[in-house]
Amino acid sequence: MRRAGIVLAAGESRRMGREKALLAWRGGTLLGAAIAALRPWCDVVIVVAGRNLEALRAAAEAGGAVVAYNPAPERGQLSSLQAGLRAAAEAGCEAAMITPVDCPPLSAASLRRLCEARTEWAALPAHAGRRGHPLLAGTELVAALLAAPATGNARAVLRRSPERIVEIEVAEKLEDLDTPEAYQRAVSDGS
C-alpha cells in the first residue's frame, strides 16, 4: 500500500508571530526536519501551504517534497488536510502519515514502529498518557476525512471509532511548538 507523508503548514502562525515552518531546528528548519523524517517511510511527502505558498515552496522542494495549495486555510485545519489527502490520492497513495509542521519529528525507530502498525483506521504515538503526531491514517480514515465537511474537525472524525485507534508508545516527549515560549523551551532542552 502506498503511503504519503503530509506536513500541514498552511496556518498563519499567529500565536508564534512568525512562520513556524521556517523556524530553526537542529541545523535546518522545522519544515526540513519534518520532510526528512517522513521521506524514508513514505512514497511521497506533501507540504500543504496556504498564503505562505511562495515562502515555503523552495524549502519544500529542496527537501524533496511536493507542495499542495489550500486556497482558504481559514476554513480550518481539516481543509488543509483534505488538500494534502487529495494530492496524496493523485500520487496513488491510499494511506498517510500526517503531522503539523510545528510538531518536532520522532526518531526513526519510533516512526518505524508507527509504520508497522496494521490498521485501516489510525495509529498514533503516545508518551506519558499524551497522544501526538504523526498520525498514521489508514484507508478507511482517509476516506472519512475526505468525506467530512472542510470546515469540520479532523479530531472529531478520528474519534468516531476510538476503539480502532492504535497507540504506539514512544520514548520521545510529544511536543507542539505553537508559541514562542514552547519553541524556546524545546530549543533550550535540545529536543
Image (tube, rainbow, N blue to C red):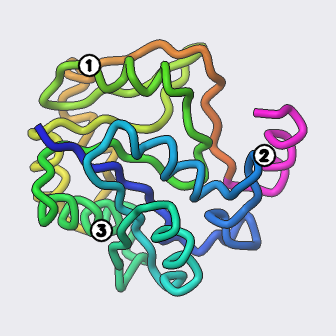
Residue lying at 73% horizontally and 50% vertically, measured from the top left: 25
The CA span between labels 1 and 3 is: 29 Å
Residue wearing tag 3:
151
The numbered mark, 3 or 2, whose residue comes first in the sequence reads: 3
**Residue 111 in the image: x percent, y percent?**
43, 27
Is residue 150 placed above or below 171 in the rendered structure?
below
68 lies left or right of 179: left
Residue wearing tag 2:
182
The answer to whether the residue labelled 2 contacts the one labelled 1, judged by CB atoms less than 8 Å apart, is no
The numbered mark, 2 or 1, whose residue comes first in the sequence reads: 1
Residue lying at 45% horizontally and 47% vertically, measured from the top left: 99
Image quarter where the C terminus lies is top right
Q: Secondary structure at mark 3?
A: loop
The CA span between labels 3 and 2 is: 27 Å
Classed neighbour count for the residue bearing mark 1: other residues with Cα under 10 Å, few (<14), some (14–19), many (≥20): some
69 lies left or right of 105: left
Q: As shown in the figure, which amino acid type bears the numbered disc 3?
A: Thr
1 or 3: mark nearer the eye: 1
Is residue 72 placed above or below 178 in the rendered structure?
below
**Residue 128 in the image: x percent, y percent?**
60, 13
Classed neighbour count for the residue bearing mark 3: other residues with Cα under 10 Å, few (<14), some (14–19), many (≥20): few
Residue wearing tag 1:
117
**Residue 93 in the image: x percent, y percent?**
15, 51
Quadrant of the rendered image containing residue 1: top left
Q: Secondary structure at mark 1?
A: loop
User: Which residues lie in the magenta part?
Assistant: 178-191
118 in the magenta segment: no
Residue lying at 19% horizontally and 52% vertically, measured from the top left: 145
